[in-house]
Image (cartoon, coloured by chain):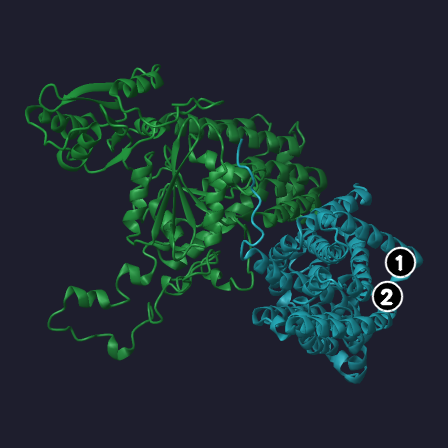
Chain colours: A green, B cyan
Amino acid sequence: MEEPAGRGLVPKTGTIPAALVNSLAAFKEQFKHAQDFVAREITIGVPPGTDAALLFIEGLAKKMEISENILENAMLLGRMALPPVAGTGEELLDLLEKRYLSFAQTTRTTRFEDAVIALLQGDSILLVDGAPAALRFDTKGWEHRAVGEPETEAVIRGPRDGFIEVMRVNVAHIRRRLRTPDLAVKQMRMGRRTQTDVSILYLVDVADNHVVEEVQRRLTGIDIDSVLESGYVSMLISDDVLSPFPLVERTERPDKVAASILEGRVAIVVDNSPFVLIVPTSFWTFFQASEDYYENPYLSTFLRLLRLAALAFTTFGTAVYVALSTFHQEVIPFALLLRIVGTHEGIPFPTLPTAIILELVIEVLREAGIRLPSPIGQAVSIVGAIIIGEAAVSAGFAPPGMVIIVAFATIASFTIPGYNMSIPLRLLRFIMLFAAGTLGLFGLGAAAMVMLIHIMGLKSFGYPYLSLYDVGTMHEMKDKIITTPVQFRSVTRPRWSEKNRVRQSATAGKPPAPRERMPRRPESTTESEKGDDGNQGPDAAGRPSEN
Amino acid sequence: MGIKDQTLPADLPRTNVTSARNLLFILLIARICNIMIFMPALTLGNAFEDSWAASLLSLAWSIPLSLLVVWASTAVPNGLLVAANQKWGKWALLFFGPYILVLAVIPAYFSVELGTLFGTVTLTETPVGVLVAVSLLVGIYAAYKGVDTIGRAGQVVITLLALLSVVMLLGIGYEADTARLQPVLSRGLLPVVTSSITPAAWTVVTIGVIPVLAGEVTRGKKGLSGAAIWANVASIGLLTVMVAAAISVFSAVEAKAMHSPAYMLAKMTSIPETFERFEVIILTAWIGAITLTCGTYLYAAAQAISEALHLTTHRTCLVPLAAFAAAVGLTLFTSTAGVTHYLPFVMPPAALIVVIFPVAAALVLRRQIAGEQNG
């Protein structure tokens, strides 16, 4: 075997030596620093038998399966004479694979580096003396978090299961919702040292080929030593990594991913991360909660408008207050102006620094609340906000009106379903504050214009990040700022793909004609007949779960 | 380290398609800004006391006008870019050049309006130079980001403006007094008709006819989009109602002085006071719209020129800067020399002159494209 030059990160390369003593020595040399590496040497067949060794990493592989399905069966062979064909090690390997070892997923590998990586992923490797190959058993099994409700995307109505840190489980979550062979699952590995598994999921007959190719191109272009979380991938494939706005969507909700895939988008599942990435994305998707599609559309529309209003307030609320109270007092109604002036009297700081300090205090409280354990964090947030706010007003450090505005702007930011969208808004608030505090509403308008232009210039995998009503995409208005009943909004897919755009049959969702409203119940209805009704099944509707 | 190349392949779909479609909205913005500034002011100014009839005529003229302009909106950038990308593009641009110069005057005129706005919207203690510099920087940034970006930003700005206009209209609606319209109608319609034709014709010539001819070359009648037509009709209707409301509230004498009902209504009305207080916000948005409009025109021109001269790697930055500087210089010149007031009289003949060349160019280009497609 040859030693790769340079990084020395992954194993020596070459074929597995036929002689067990050599192959075992090679593995032991490779894992000489790893005390959790286990090499169980056994003998197969009647004495003197054939020497073999089972290799695995303790903690990554399921010992029970190794004992019951591999070791037990293999060692039982010690009590029986192997067929005459089992003359060479390779032939013995054949017999073990096909006749004796009852293991669900077994593959054969001849490359040393593949075997090493398999071990690191939790697989077990069986070496047999005289065979220049090894059997690889899928014995992955380590302790992981149970499937639970997503903490960052909780809903009142909707499925409660969320992604966890195991990629295979996450892919199964999605697969369970999209029971179609057209769901492509492409796997790759990235991270020179972490060898993190990554899966790309999309519908082959729906997703835009160019986008799929572009996703694969960007992912294969990643050359980094570690990918510890999907956030790494998100940044590495982003169209504009310097922009504060998220150009890759992330979610903990399988139903959201399934709906996105049905829209023609591509999901990226990264091992060790409960956040699945979705591309391309748009500004509006961060304001759409899964629940919007499960609840009454009028309520959902109201909530979306409310979120947009909250977005405006959280970004501009404090800044407008500063601009009005500092420069444009004539805009404020007289009675309110008197009140504001009264509260500002005696405040030792100018309005702008006061606002910035208050915003910073709120950010500190928010950060402290997140880092501390849940009960303590909530207490710190609430008590801190109340006490510090009250104390600041009482001590004459801050006007009460500003405290109210800042607090409400902070609360408003929590209404945005996409948490990673609220992060840039938190930062932008300070820029808006500064602009409003120096040039008044004109400065605020200019800063808002720059922000708008910046957002408008962003693209996510070639698609405009924010567009309001492009010609040709007007049908998306049915599910953008507002939402409509599924009968209307799911007629065609959004702009993400040109393929298979029709999602419902022509009659789907339309109210039946009067004479059809009370159909006569047939004498007997078979399962196949039920399936023929294109309007009943979730697949016929085309969108079992929406996003 | 990291991803090797994050640039997208050139043929990634929808991007170009979306860009092309957005161009419609880009010049829709320009059209709205243009008409909202020029049309009511000139119409009312020429109609003197006959403002109500002038408003109606404004609507009558504006509908076919807007159709033409929408049609043109799809064609101007496309026509320039298509022409510039051809091997004969350089020669074609010789014909389009005067038109581009005409376009450069429009932002100059906008800048004059912008200057008058600064006095009311901004802080009195802030030097106007700082404010102009900030606006210019925003405009340059918009131009740098490109025509696609400006187009979609314009969608948002125009939508916000329209929403604000509706709110204002509702706010002042109940104060309207139709009795103020009677003196206007008592003088007959003929003077109003003749006076209102001038601004409409002027607008048609400057931003209508030439692009329509260019559109014939590139896209033809496909440029007429149903959604955009309705958007135009709605905006024109809104504008006319607003002008009429302004007249009924303030009388024609006061309304005559308005340049744009959208902000002047908010500025002049005292009832309800709430809407008046939002004057500065509206004006800020208005400045943004004007900035984007200027950036659009300049970017389109810069794009065409740089493409034609094979300076594609140097596009977007230098030419818009130079054009903007020229526009500002022209503004200063016209303001200083008092030429601004004569612009409506100077522009039509100038535009008519430049029509001759693009017409000839359009015919030639059409023939050449047809020839290339055939063989």
> How far apart are the alpha carbons under marks 2 and 1?
9 Å
Within 10 angstroms of label 2, few (less than 14), some, or many (20 or more) residues?
few
* Image quarter of the N terminus of chain A: top left
In depth, the one of A9 and A427 nearer the eye is A9
A414, above or below B249, in the image: above
Q: Chain of mark 1?
A: B
Q: Which residue is mark 1?
A: B334
In depth, the one of A28 and B116 nearer the eye is A28
Amino acid tagged 1: Thr
**Is residue A305 in view from this perspective?**
no
Determine whether the residue tagged by mark 2 lies in a helix, strand or loop: helix
B175, above or below A258, in the image: below
Q: Which residue is mark 2?
A: B343
**Marks 2 & 1, CB-CB < 8 Å contact:** yes
In depth, the one of A398 and A100 nearer the eye is A100
Relative placement, left or right, of B63 versus B360 is left
Name the residue rendered at 68%, 67% in the picture: B75
**Is residue A503 in view from this perspective?**
yes
Q: Chain of mark 2?
A: B
Amino acid tagged 2: Leu
| Residue placed furthest toward the right | B337
